[in-house]
């Protein structure tokens, strides 16, 4: 956790920020590792890169209490779910790590989007 507590963030928002940052990290690792796995990993790489970008952006929107974080949260949740489904299909450790971490991020993003 980068900050103990943001003034405007309740526990759910802080958890979502943490989940988004973790998702961004694992997706960056996965995309980089998949680049060495061959052309059949292109979709995984693209989805992981999308999640890494959107999840880190969503965390920043929540940190600054943007009025648009809910809309971005829905998109982040959708991408996390799609990427987790893709990663589940691959036996690589990095893909399995994504498949494990991303559903939790999706759930917390959906919770933030509906709050």
Image: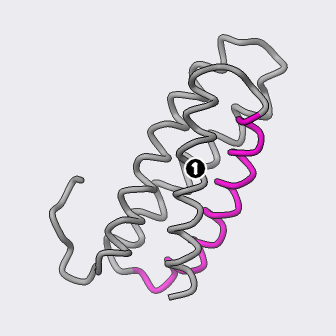
| Residue found at x 77% / y 39% | 86
* Overall secondary structure of the magenta section: helix
Is residue 105 or residue 44 the one in the foreground?
105
| Residue found at x 36% / y 57% | 18
Is 71 inside the magenta-drawn segment? yes
Say above or below: 56 vs 101. Answer: below
Q: Is residue 44 left or right of residue 115?
A: right
Is 102 inside the magenta-drawn segment? no
Q: Is residue 95 left or right of residue 21?
A: right
Q: Position of residue 109 (x, y in %)?
A: 54, 69
Q: Is residue 74 left or right of residue 29?
A: right
Q: Position of residue 115 (x, y in %)?
A: 50, 88
| Residue found at x 36% / y 65% | 15
Q: Position of residue 30 (x, y in %)?
A: 58, 28
Q: Does dot 1 land on a helix, a strand or a loop?
A: helix
What range of the chain is rendered magenta? 66-88
Q: Position of residue 72 (x, y in %)?
A: 58, 71
Q: Dot 1 corresponds to which residue?
A: 102
Say above or below: 13 vs 22. Answer: below
| Residue found at x 37% / y 74% | 13
Say above or below: 39 vs 16. Answer: above
């Amino acid at each position: 956790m980068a900050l103990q507590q943001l003034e405007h963030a309740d526990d759910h928002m802080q958890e979502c920020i943490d989940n988004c940052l973790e998702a961004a990290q694992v997706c960056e690792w996965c995309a980089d590792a998949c680049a060495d796995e061959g052309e059949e990993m292109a979709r995984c790489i693209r989805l992981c890169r999308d999640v890494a970008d959107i999840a880190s952006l969503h965390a920043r929107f929540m940190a600054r209490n943007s009025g648009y974080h809910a809309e971005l949260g829905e998109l982040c949740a959708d991408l996390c779910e799609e990427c987790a489904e893709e990663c589940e299909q691959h036996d690589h450790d990095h893909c399995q790590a994504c498949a494990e971490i991303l559903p939790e991020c999706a759930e917390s993003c959906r919770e933030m989007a509906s709050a």
